[in-house]
Image (cartoon, rainbow, N blue to C red):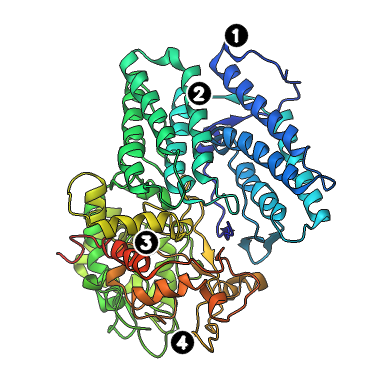
Amino acid sequence: MNKNILVVKAKTYTFGICLLLLIVSCNNKSETVDIKKLASTNEQVEALYISELQECIKHLERISISNASKDNVAAYKQARLHFKQIEPILAAVDKNNFKSLNAPNILQVNEEDATDIKIRNPFGFQVIEELLHEPELDTLLLKNVVSVTRDRIKLLKANTRIQLKDYHLIWLIRDQIIRTATTGITGFDSPVLGQALKESQYTTSTLLKLIDIYKDNFTSDAVYNELTGALKNGISALDADFETFDRYDFIKNHTDVQLQALLKTQDDWRVSFPFEMAISNTAKSLFDKQTLNVFYFSDYKSDTLNLKQKEVFGKQLFNDSLLSKSQTMACATCHIKDKAFTDGRTVFNNKQIRNTPTLSYSGYQQSFFMDGRAGSLEGQVVGVAENHDEFNLPMDSIVDRVLKHPNYKQQLETLYKGKRADYNIRHAIASYIRTLNDFDSKFDNNINGKAQTITADEKQGFNLFMGKAACATCHFPPLFNGTVPPNYNDTEVELLGVPQVPDTVNAVISGDLGRYDVFQTEERKHFFKTPTVRNIAKTAPYMHNGVYESLEAVVDFYNRGGGKGIGIHEDYQTLPFDNLDLTPKEQMQLVAFMNSLTDAGFEEE
């Protein structure tokens, strides 16, 4: 699956070091360890991990340029099987190596800042899979990619000692349950063979093995049986055809059931968590408002004292034109509430080149603006303030104005103790924006069992979105934006080949260079951040330049294969398909589903 992975801003969470400690060790590991005879759970997990790594290496070494194609594919499938078997553990103990080994077959661009831009060719399983299915085999490239992939796994095997606490294992299991529901069943990382459902069975089977290792932790046989039964039922449900698989049913009746059984498990174990990551420690449903921790996405996680009052203060500032030089523009001027915080225009005025993005759910991102140039909502406020075509007023001047407003000055002193006025003003506005995420759409309420009003077309539209139409390989549930679950560390940018005007005959790509303008990285021309699809029925027109007036037109663009399908040829286009081959009815069903994502109360005061 072609995907574009961009690290916009490196974030160091020092507490994450203890998530699952990977300690370098030069010990030689026995290949024939009897896992059950080992004394500790850590030794048993490590033995399981090492065993699967060794099997993976063995089958990678069977891939050779001298083999028949079918033999190489068979060897690859076995190597991939064992890689997926270790996915839950590897993704937890070493996120970076997991990401590299599972990277899409697309150039990797990491932009830390203007002086630290790294461009690398990908390696790993997805690359091997695509190479093995090319019409003409590039033997030299295949040999190199297989060698690099194998050697990286050998390095993992030689330098691994795993140490887990109980809460680490709970995190590991929860992450994998959500990874399966958000990327596993979508085909996100099975680009050619389409083995997404089978591979999801492999990863879930590893969870069962881990739980068996930790069986003595359970004080209740009923809780143990409920968790293992939920996972086994999920494995059975995954035994299905990719295109006809009912993902709506799977998430409602398996993912959520597994999450709820895991909650009972951590209660049974009396697990105490030292902190909370992106996914709540009490997540009970994929589409529940409490599932994701919005403060994980902020650089300022500790500033939650008097939060409700700060949100109210931020809303006042958001709606006040005092913050602009001419005092004729507020945040709310372009981000209108009854339009899901957009403005309904192609562009706001003749000074703008981009469509106004929605602010709903915008708090759940790791980069901001359509080109991802800001690393936080607080930082985005600075960009708006200092833009000559927007507020056109430096932050120090905004601070002066706010401090001269008696009510605002009093709130700053009361809520923030009068310190860091610049930051506090921005924090208040950002705090308000982080509340614009109700998760109470028709779709949410139905998949959570609060209503039974979803139509057959809306449900099928979701299944298409998550499957055949490949929408969810860029717009990840439950946010339906480009922030990648389950770690939520990266917000992706994509090159779609969006045209300047809605022309399918003589199409010319939009002149906006997008991400390129941030660091002038040639490989990032015309890349833009993947926005949320939530509330999309209220946010027309669409795309970064507002080129499409309707969702039907957007779906048609994707169905044709993006820019490539209308004659726009860009080397780095990230859409993975030539066309989607969706029928008119399927396109209608996709639109019906997206219309069901409108929050019930976002227009209300």
**Disc with the residue nearer the chain's start (3 vs 2):** 2
Find disc 2 in the rendering and name its residue: 210
Picture coordinates of residue 133, whole percent (x, y): 69, 55
Q: Is any part of residue 439 visible from this angle?
A: yes
Front position among marks 3 and 1: 1
**Disc with the residue nearer the chain's start (1 vs 4):** 1
Find disc 1 in the rendering and name its residue: 37
Which label is found at residue 362? 3
The local secondary structure at tag 3 comes to loop
Picture coordinates of residue 545, whole percent (x, y): 44, 80
Question: Is the Cβ of the residue at disc 3 closer than 8 Å to that at disc 1?
Answer: no
Query: Going 40% across and 58% down the picture, which residue do you hit?
Result: 465
Find disc 4 in the rendering and name its residue: 501
46 horizontally vs 417: left or right: right
Q: Distance between the residues labelled 3 and 4?
A: 27 Å
**Disc with the residue nearer the chain's start (4 vs 2):** 2
The amino acid beneath tag 4 is: Val
**Disc with the residue nearer the chain's start (3 vs 1):** 1
The amino acid beneath tag 2 is: Leu
**Disc with the residue nearer the chain's start (3 vs 4):** 3
**Disc with the residue nearer the chain's start (1 vs 2):** 1
